[in-house]
Image (cartoon, rainbow, N blue to C red):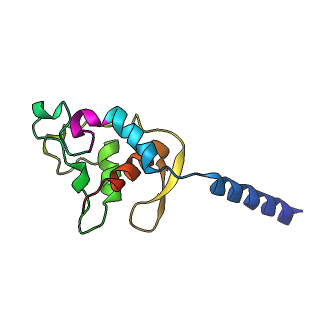
């Protein structure tokens, strides 16, 4: 009977994992439009309506990839406010409190799936989709 209980538990866990839908760039675009375009602009180039009054200017988010690799861990850390190392003045607001919700498994580049709030993962998917180069 113990074995049957373990099998049922494993089946329930597997069903939950399979039921997770991953966020896509369109979902992230909506979050970007609500929270980021004021500074980073519609295309993420750092040319939003508030950008002219900011020093330093907001980053060009379409140029984050380095040698074709998108820095997922770094991007997630900057957005949620965990890591602002190397950002002059640290002017970007912290969005960690706005990006709460159910978590989804995201590979941040080390092969390990990290539970990440869905809105944060969606925003990352959008930023990854607008990379030029």
Q: Is residue 21 left or right of residue 126?
A: right
Q: Within the magenta stretch, is there residue 38?
A: yes
Q: Is residue 80 left or right of residue 17?
A: left
* Res 56 seen here: yes
> What quarter of the picture does the N terminus occupy?
bottom right
* Quarter assignment of residue 18: bottom right
Q: Within the magenta stretch, is there residue 68?
A: no
Looking at the image, is 8 positioned above or below residue 83? Answer: below
Q: Is residue 21 left or right of residue 118?
A: right
* Res 96 seen here: no
**Which is nearer the eye, 63 or 115?**
63
Magenta region, residue range: 36-43
Looking at the image, is 49 positioned above or below residue 89? Answer: above
Residue in view at x 22 percent, y 56 percent? 63
Looking at the image, the residue that sits furthest to the right is 1
Give residue 93's position: percent from left, percent from top.
26, 35
């Amino acid at each position: 009977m113990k074995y049957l209980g373990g099998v049922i538990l494993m089946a329930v866990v597997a069903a939950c994992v399979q039921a997770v839908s991953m966020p896509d760039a369109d979902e992230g675009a909506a979050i970007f439009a609500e929270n980021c375009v004021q500074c980073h602009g519609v295309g993420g180039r750092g040319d939003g309506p508030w950008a002219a009054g900011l020093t330093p200017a907001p980053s060009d988010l379409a140029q984050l990839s380095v040698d074709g690799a998108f820095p997922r861990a770094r991007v997630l850390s900057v957005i949620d406010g965990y890591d602002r190392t190397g950002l002059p003045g640290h002017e970007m607001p912290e969005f960690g409190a706005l990006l709460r919700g159910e978590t989804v498994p995201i590979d941040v580049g080390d092969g390990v799936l990290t539970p990440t709030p869905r809105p944060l993962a969606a925003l990352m998917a959008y930023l990854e989709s607008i990379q030029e180069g």
